[in-house]
Amino acid sequence: MSVEKTARAAGGASAEKTVHAKSGWPMLLLVIVLAAACVVGIVAGAMMLPPEDVPITTGAQTFGLVLMVVSIVAVCVGPLLLFMGFFTIQPNQARVLILFGDYKGTVRDEGFHWANPFLSRSAGTTIDAGTGKSTPKSTKVSLRARTYNGEHLKVNDKCGNPIEIADVIVWRVENTAKAFFDVDDYNSYVHTQSETALRHVATTYAYDQMPGEPEGEITLRSNIEEVSAALKDELAVRLEKAGVVIDDARLTHLAYAPEIAQAMLRRQQADAVIAAREKIVQGAVSMVEMALTELSAKNVVDLDDERKAAMVSNLMVVLCGESDAQPVLNTGTLYQ
């Protein structure tokens, strides 16, 4: 095996060594030839032996017995031992080579390979936190992108409001040495750190713009892209120790907790009503101003201040009222 590169890591972290394993096809041919030679040796030795009831007396017969025994031992040990060195690697898959506890490198080349048959086929054991059962950890690791859908978490936002939040992350293993030797179980590590990072990001921002807060402040509801980028950066820092990179991180669920959802909904409705009323009043004032300006410019009617005030009042009622205006005929004047 030839070493291609060594990725150095700081802080005592494991360094990955990429190596190339031998092709398995020549070794497979060698195993077949060796097995065939052992079978020929067994047959040839058996033919040199005398009949069952006749003792071995000559050197040729002794040689035949030794040849048959050696061939039987060789066919049981040699091809079987060599056969244990074969392994396959699929696209976007790697195998970590461990020889008697010593890390020898990582094979990333896809195909049929052969390596030292004494290489470990497990990299220790993992313990399930729920059941407490331990399972052997395979030395093969997938380099494909994986998706983790986080559970709904109940946390407090920056303002202390209880909210429900969930995320989805796309991750993959980049440094196999860190994934195997720097953390106990990189899958569980990713899941745990994903929850921790999401809780930290949720407490950093407010759910929505609160009264008295400066305009343009990033919020969870209004700035999804910025929050997702912050979550991705947080995860990248936390998962670097496990040799994992984050391709994408997004929020999949965001809502107020049930105990305050109704109150917050009423506040949002009130904000919406106030904003709508403000927009209506601004438009009505502009229309009244335009009407008075046009009447004066075209000398349609000469209005004093009192009549202007009455006209403004009537127009504001018509433009800002929620129900249709009812016309009233005035048979008198404003002064009688």
Image (spheres, helix red, strand yellow):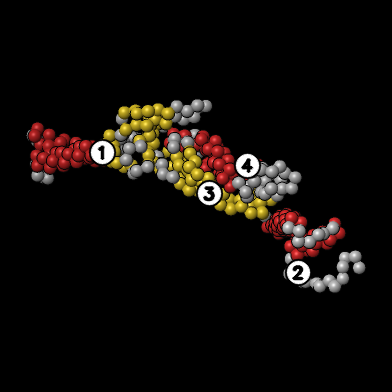
Tell me the quadrant of the picture where the C terminus can be found. Answer: bottom right
In the image as oriented, which residue stretches furthest toward the right? Answer: 336
Question: Label 1 vs label 3: CA separation?
Answer: 40 Å
**Does the CB distance between marks 2 and 1 fall below 8 Å?**
no
Q: Which residue is mark 1?
A: 24
At label 1, the amino acid type is Gly
Say which label, 4 or 3, has the lower sequence index: 3
Above or below — where is 83 with respect to 207? Answer: above
Numbered badge on residue 168: 3
Q: Locate the N terminus by quadrant.
A: top left
- Residue 55 as seen in the image, left or right of residue 150: left
Identify the secondary structure beneath mark 1. helix
Instruction: Name the kind of residue labelled 4 in the image.
Output: His
As drawn, the label of residue 325 is: 2
Residue 200 - label:
4
- Cα distance in 3D space between marks 4 and 3: 15 Å
Q: Can you tell which of label 1 and label 3 is closer to the viewer?
A: 3
Q: Closer to the observer: label 1 or label 4?
A: 4
Q: Looking at the image, which is closer to me, 139 or 313?
A: 313
Structural crowding at the residue carrying mark 1, measured as other residues with C-alpha within 10 Å and reported as few (<14), some (14–19) or many (≥20)? some
Q: State which tag comes first along the sequence, 2 or 1.
A: 1
C-alpha separation, residue under disc 2 versus residue under disc 4: 54 Å
Q: Is residue 175 left or right of residue 272?
A: left
How packed is label 2: few (under 14 Cα within 10 Å), some, or many (20 or more)? Answer: few
